[in-house]
Amino acid sequence: MRSYTLIAPAKINLYLEIISDRPDGYHELAMILQSVDLADEIYLQSLDTESICVKCNHPQVPTDQSNLAYRAAALMATKFPQALAEYGGVEITINKHIPVAAGLAGGSTNAAAVLMGIDLLWNLGLTKSELEELGATLGSDVPFCIAGGTVIATGRGEKLSPLPNLDTIYIVLAKYRSLEVSTAWAYKTYRQEFGNSYLRDSENLAARAAAVHSEAIVKAILNQDPGKIAAKLHNDLERVVLPAYPQVLQLRELFASFTGVLGTMMSGSGPTVFALVESEEQAEAVKLQMRAVIPDQDLELFVTRTITQGVQVA
Ligand SMILES: C[C@@](CO)(OP(=O)(O)O)[C@H](O)COP(=O)(O)OP(=O)(O)OC[C@H]1O[C@@H](n2ccc(N)nc2=O)[C@H](O)[C@@H]1O
Ligand SMILES: Nc1ncnc2c1ncn2[C@@H]1O[C@H](COP(=O)(O)OP(=O)(O)O)[C@@H](O)[C@H]1O
């Protein structure tokens, strides 16, 4: 019986600009995605039968066919039926550490780990770009979770251009356990409220505008300048999520008021808010400050840091 354990890291969005809507219902984006060391462990074990089964220690995560990890395995089974017959199905055990429905790509990174793990279990020898292409059919953030590091993502988030590795930056994450924001709702509301400001002249114009806006943060990343990176954080989805979720706005304002915080932003469609911090010591101090102001145990707080890789075999 063969088995693999994979480490599946979360991401944050250092930059998220919505360029336009698309005929397929998605949005054209310009993003900078960053892997962080808060990660789930994914344990894969071959089965004698051709079935797929998912186990997870987190009550909010479904273990049926709606689990993104299950869907990743089902996709591999459909694409490679001979390998499924030869090597058997797979049992997927997810040890969740990443908060669920948080804007941290928890499900996407689990799916990425399953694609990479099954590639190994079934001796398929797929390239990273082949795996990323398969991943894009499961979710917009899945290709990035395979690539990892610091990456410019365009299209609906699946077209990736790597940036140089960032030196370690410490990060504090804050998320109310019971608060969920639907990604589809966030984009739909943005389209309803701000859609008339999209650039529609031509794809090129839209791409050029995105390049101009994100230029400053890309430069700061190339210069390894955490202060400037923090000053240029941006997320268009804050325009719809912050007014609708005052608790998220409060976290954002509190982080901004703490000593040692270089910059703060909501990640993805939220509701996680992150703060870039000067040092590990400052990060622990910022976490303590937040806990002192909000003792409510529904608020989850994590100290994490930037990393240079996506999913890895343990
Ligand atoms: C907002 C972001 C930012 O990184 O992340 P999360 O907050 O989910 O982590 C991503 O754009 C989310 O990526 P992901 O969670 O993989 O999205 P998908 O499953 O592909 O899409 C979920 C829904 O979001 C909307 N969507 C997503 C991506 C995109 N470029 N345009 C969209 O309009 C669509 O309504 C889609 O049905
Ligand atoms: N493997 C998985 N891990 C986490 N959530 C999952 C998974 N598979 C499906 N889901 C569902 O996907 C939804 C989004 O969760 P998640 O991927 O953690 O958030 P986000 O896309 O905001 O980063 C949740 O409602 C959850 O029930």
Image: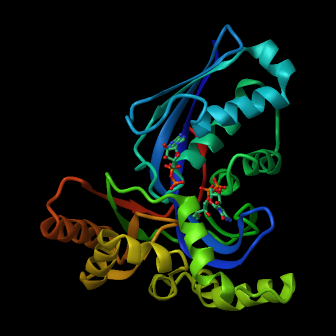
Asked whether 151 or 153 is in front, the reply is 153
Residue at image point 18% right, 71% down: 289
Residue 158 lies left or right of residue 37; in this view the side is right
Residue 264: horizontal and vertical position, in percent?
39, 78
Residue 258 lies left or right of residue 214; in this view the side is left
Residue at image point 72% right, 65% down: 156
For ligand 1, which image quadrant applies?
bottom right
Residue 8 lies left or right of residue 18; in this view the side is left
Pick the quarter of the image with the N terminus.
top right
* Residue 147 at least partly seen: yes
Residue 92: horizontal and vertical position, in percent?
56, 26
Query: Eyeballing the image, is 180 above or below 213?
Result: above
**Applied colour scheme:** rainbow
Quadrant of the rendered structure where residue 274 is? bottom left
Residue at image point 45% right, 72% down: 241
* Residue 16 at least partly seen: no
> Seen from this angle, which residue lies furthest front?
192
Quadrant of the rendered structure where residue 4 is? top right
Quadrant of the rendered structure where residue 112 is? top right
